[in-house]
Amino acid sequence: MKRRSILVVDDDESLRRITQMQLEEAGYDALTASNGNAALALIEEEAPALVITDLRMPGLSGLELLKKVRESYPHTTVLMITAFGTVQTAVEAMKAGAYDYITKPIDYEELVLVVNRAMEHHQLLEEVRTLRASLDNKYGFESIIGRSKVLLNVLEMASRVAQKNSTVLIRGETGTGKELLARAIHQNSRRKDQPFVTINCGAIPKDLLESELFGHAKGSFTGAFSPKRGKVETADGGTLFLDEIGELPVELQVKLLRLIQQGEIEKVGATSPATVDVRIIAATHRNLQSLIEDGSFREDLFYRLAVIPLELPPLRERSDDIPELVQSLFLKAKQKHGVPNLKLPPHLIPYFCGYRWPGNVRELENVVERLTVLAVGDEIALSDLPEFLRGERPGHEAIQLELPPQGISLEAVEKELILKALKKFEGNQTKAAAFLDVSRRTLIYRMEKHGIHRESDETPEG
C-alpha cells in the first residue's frame, strides 16, 4: 500500500524546498508543486493525505485550489499558508473547508505542530470512513453526518465498543441523534443479524410499562387473556435500546438490574424467571447524577449502564457540520417530496450556521423539510427562511484598549485574552473558543504555543 504523503504547493522554489526538507525531517513524505494546476495533477496521481498551499500564487490561487480539492478530492485535508496582511482571507479559506492556516514568515516548529494535528485529524476521518463503508446505508455510522472532531471522537469510540457486549449509555440533548447512534452500534456488532428493539421509557404509562418490557403470563391481570412476550424477550439475541432511561420507575429499575447482572427476567404473573441474552444500550437527555441524589434513580443501575458512556454533542458545539447537514437533509427532503430540481443557493447556508439550534439536528431537519415543502419556484429565497434564521448575527462590541507609548507585545495580549477566556468559562475550551470566535482546535494550538496548560474540557452533564 502506498504511503500517504504531503504535497507542498508554492511558486517560491526556495520556500518549497525548505518546507519539504523540514517535513521530511519530521518523518513525512513530502512532494512539491510550483502551481495549482501541477498540484491537481499530483493529487490525482499520488492521493496525498495533506495539501499545504500558498494562498497567493500566479494562475490558480490557493483559494481556487482549495475549492477544486474540496470538490473533487473531499477526503484530502488542506492547510493554507498566508502573509500576515491576508489573514482574513485565510480565515475565509477555513470557512470554505481548509483545516487551518499559518502565516509567513513560517515558523517551522509551528508548521510541524499544525501538520501533526492535521494528519491526526485526517487519520481519524479515514478510520471513521472505513468503518462507515463497512456498514449498510440505512443505520450505519455513515448516516450520522459530520466531520467535526468532537463528533468523530464519539463515532471512533462507538466503533471500538460496537464489537463488545458491554452496556452503553448515550447522553445528549433532545434531537442529537441518540437512537441513530444506538442503531449504528448494533449494526456494527456481532448481533447485527438479530433484532434491534427500542422502547421509550417515558412514552408508556407506568402501569403498562412493566408488561411492555418484560411481558406477562395469561390471567396475570384483568384483560390478560393470553400470554405476551415483552420487548426484552423480543430482543433476545440482539440489542435492547432503552430510550429516556431516566424516566424508568424505581420499581422497574430493580428488574432491569437483574436482567443486566443475571440475564433473567420475570414476567408479570409468572412463577419462574426466564433467561434472555440481550445487549443493553440506554439513552437519556437528563442528568442521572441529579436523579440519583434525589432518590429517583438507582446508583448501582447507573454504574451498570454507564460501562461505556458516550456523549453526543449538541449541534451548537459542532457548527462546522451544519453546511454538510443542511445539504444532506435538503437532498433527503427533495427525494421525499418529489422536487429534484429545487435548489438551495450556497449564499443561504451561513444563515443556518448563525443559529444555536436548541432542538439540534431534529429541529434543523424540520426546518429544511418545511422549506422544501413550502418553496415557490425552483430556488429557495432568503425570504423563504424563517425569521429567526434571517436575523443578522450581532457584531462584536468594540474593545477599548489603551496602547502604551513604548509599544505592546501582540503575543502577550493574545496569551492574556486566552487566559481570561478560559478563566471566565472555568477551563471549558469549547466555550472559551466560541467566546473568542475561533475554532476549538485553533484555541488548543494557541494554548500550546503560549505554554498554557491544557486541562479537561468535559462539560458537566445536564
Image (tube, rainbow, N blue to C red):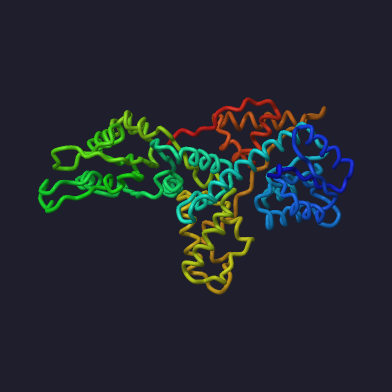
Q: Position of residue 358 (x, y in %)?
A: 47, 48
Q: Position of residue 401 (x, y in %)?
A: 71, 35
In this rendering, does residue 174 appear at all?
A: no
Residue 206: quadrant of the picture = top left
Left or right: where does residue 51 sit relative to residue 311?
Answer: right
Q: Nearer the viewer, residue 162 or 254?
A: 162
Lateral position of residue 217 relative to residue 358, left or right: left
Task: Indicate the position of residue 346 as horizontal and vertical percent values.
Answer: 63, 61
Q: Is residue 317 above or below residue 332?
A: above
Q: Which quadrant: the C terminus? A: top left
Q: Residue at x 64, y 38 (%)?
A: 120
Camera sees residue 344? yes
Q: Position of residue 171 (x, y in %)?
A: 42, 40
Which one is in front, 190 or 34?
Answer: 190
The residue under the point 63% across, 48% down is 395
Quadrant containing the N terminus in the rendered view:
top right
| Residue lying farthest to the bottom in this orientation | 377
Q: Quadrant of residue 249?
A: top left
Q: Quadrant of residue 425?
A: top right
